[in-house]
Amino acid sequence: MKYAVLLGDGMADHPVPELGGRTPLQTAKKPDMDMLAREGVTGMVRTIPPGMPTGSDTANMAVFGYDPKEYYTGRSSIEAISMGIELKDDDLAFRCNLVTLSGSGAYEEKTMIDYSSDEIETEDAAVMITELDAHLSQKGIKFFPGKSYRHCMVWNMGIRGMALTPPHDILEKKTGKYLPDGDGSSLFIKMMKESFEFLSGHRINAKRAAKGLRPANSIWLWGEGSRLKLPSFKETYRLKGSVISAVDLVKGIGIASGMKSVDVKGATGNISTNFRGKAEAALQELRDGSDFVYIHIEAPDECGHRHEVENKVRSVELIDSQVLRPLIEGLEKLGGGYRIMLLPDHQTPLELRTHTGDPVPFVIYDSRGREAAMEDFLQAATAPDSVVKCSVMQEDSIMPNDQEDSTTPNDQETPRKGTGPAGAAAPDTHAGGTGIGLGLPSAGHRTVPCPIPCLTGAPAYDEVSAVSTGLMIEKGHALMGIFTGRTIHS
Ligand SMILES: [Zn+2]
């Protein structure tokens, strides 16, 4: 049996006016995702525990099977692992972006134009970060070059708990109100100001200006993290795993859990990425003895942040045709049965241009049929300490499309914790989703073509909820246990 997670970062969305009130997932042509949803088990999962940062770090950690509440130590330390930086117990890591600030006058008066300096080339950025490390040369502080605009600063015996703001959250805003705050912040502000002095006249920026590219004229520090320690994925799930991603954040989680991280040529983290190369790399890993592959595609998230509506739709279509199709074909050839889990880590709604922590739709497909995929769900749902909620809902209380977003699905229903099989006993008046979502024989149930509307083009994303699927997983990390059939309790 082989296992593949296909994760479209930020793929879930809200209804988009430019798409006639449909979501990018609803709009996209994606025959293979539709097939998985039709033949597999679907539901909603809360990947980000309430109150935790709504990012790919917490969300992917949960999907990998690790409860962020227990294991999350901050963002930058995860990236550091992937960058090959060995953190000591008394080290703090910080994300160091190369950003574009504009405007004259004091640093506080400058505006955050671009958190990525036009996605500066890795080679140019490495020169700048290396020179900056020598130039700033603070005791106990070291800068490490990463990819494009994403770099790392390590502060030995650093001060924890400063208020730091991600630069992508303050686009078009003046920096003054968002500079580091709290104990230790004066050092950070000093370094950021000095970086501006140093980088503004840098020869690489002169070269960039000549090409019409934005200058990388300041560093921006955020995303504090201390050393991350995760239990071995192999020992926990008894599967040998590989991770395939362009971004250090996701690679870092995989590496910290003992997985092999595979670099794919042309993997960029945006819509120009080598989609097919990722599928091929995943299949090669499976052929070489891995039981499990985690394929992460960043493109939909970047499109969400940039409010690129058409590209977000396109990125879903490319995931379907260039990753999922070859993956299915390859797995079929391998033989021996397989499971695929398809999901986003979090929503990155185009209208918000940032992440939300709301539940996201998932699909688990088992090549042996839906009953096989259901076995572990039923076991999970009926366990006394279940984190899978199955719910039944009266047809007449289905929420209107324009109301649901302000509420969580469970506000609108009576959750029946651990009542998986009870869903099958729902009377005929219930909305058709319940029995379908559970994959149970739907005696007398109205059938619907697919329980996840956003994957098939049914009315609206709003309807994708525990209500329409009958299944809600309250804790994202439980999903991996169910997927692998290994650890099914919280
Ligand atoms: Zn994002």
Image (cartoon, rainbow, N blue to C red):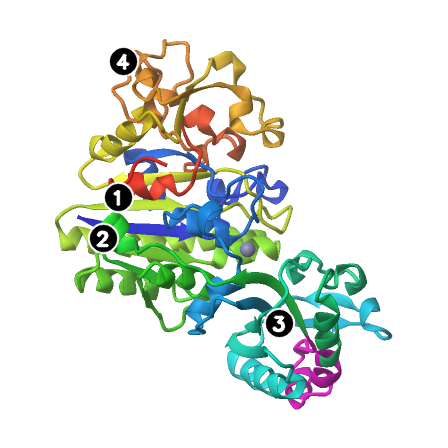
Residue 223 lies, with reference to residue 40, above or below; the image says: below
Mark 1 and mark 4 lie on one chain; the one further toward the N terminus is 4
The location of residue 355, given as percent across then percent down, is 58, 48
Between disc 4 and disc 2, whose residue precedes? 2
- Report crowding for label 2: few under 14, some 14 to 19, many 20 or more residues within 10 A (C-alpha): some
Q: Secondary structure at mark 2?
A: loop
Q: Residue at x 30, y 56 (%)?
A: 232
Indicate whether residue 296 is drawn in magenta: no
CB atoms of marks 1 and 2 within 8 Å: yes
Could you tell me which secondary element the residue under label 3 belongs to? loop
Horizontal and vertical percent position of residue 334: 15, 55
Q: Could you tell me how far apart the alpha carbons at marks 4 and 3 are, in whole angstroms?
A: 57 Å
Give the mark nearest the N terminus, 1 or 2: 2
**Residue displayed at 53% across by 78% down:** 144
Residue at 57% in and 79% down: 142
Name the foreground residue: 362 vs 19: 362
Mark number, residue 118: 3
Crowd around label 1: few <14 · some 14–19 · many ≥20 (10 Å): many
Residue under pointer 4 = 443
Q: Amino acid at mark 2?
A: Leu
Q: Secondary structure at mark 1?
A: helix
Question: Is 466 left, or right, of 31 in this rendering?
Answer: right
Q: Nearer the viewer, mark 1 or mark 3?
A: 1
